[in-house]
Amino acid sequence: MPPPELWNGRIKWNIRRKRTMPKCLPLEEVETMLEYFRRRGDQETVVFLHLIADTGARLGEVTTATTRDVDLRRLLMNVMGKGRKPRIVALTEEMGQILSR
């Protein structure tokens, strides 16, 4: 436990929890989800899952992106990140081909 700090005659403990990165899905689970939606003919969900898996973008970032946010020539996509901060994510060539259809 960290040492206490004195604050206005009271003891204030400086306790911080160790933060860990969120766990990601194993590749097998991602492939299973993609295959499930492919068999159902749900191409839109397949594209969303590919975007999330290929770019590391969050679901909210992908769902709020528009066609104007995608640059297929440079394989980049503008997304609105946490705290309304814009950021750019790279697309794979395969994703570029999927989006160009």
Image (cartoon, rainbow, N blue to C red):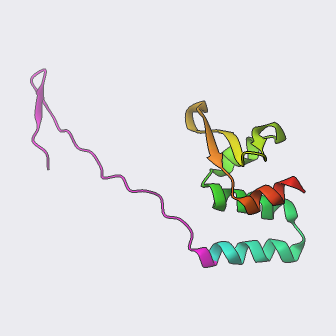
Give the magenta range: 1-28
Q: Is residue 13 one of those drawn in magenta?
A: yes
- Residue 90 placement, left or right of 100: left
| Direction top: furthest residue | 8
Q: Residue at x 43, y 56 (%)?
A: 21
Residue at (30%, 50%) from the top-left corner? 17
Considering every residue shown, the one lying at the far front of the view is: 73
Q: Residue at x 72, y 73 (%)?
A: 33
Q: Position of residue 89 (x, y in %)?
A: 63, 46
Residue 36 x/y as whole percent: 78, 76
**Residue 81 coordinates in the image, percent (x, y):** 60, 39
Q: Is residue 78 left or right of residue 26?
A: right
Q: Position of residue 70 (x, y in %)?
A: 77, 43
Q: Is residue 42 left or right of residue 83?
A: right
User: What secondary structure characterizes most of the magenta part?
Assistant: loop
Residue situated in front as seen by the camera: 20 or 70: 70
Q: Is residue 17 above or below residue 68?
A: below
Q: Nearer the viewer, residue 64 or 91?
A: 91
Closest to the observer, 12 or 16: 16
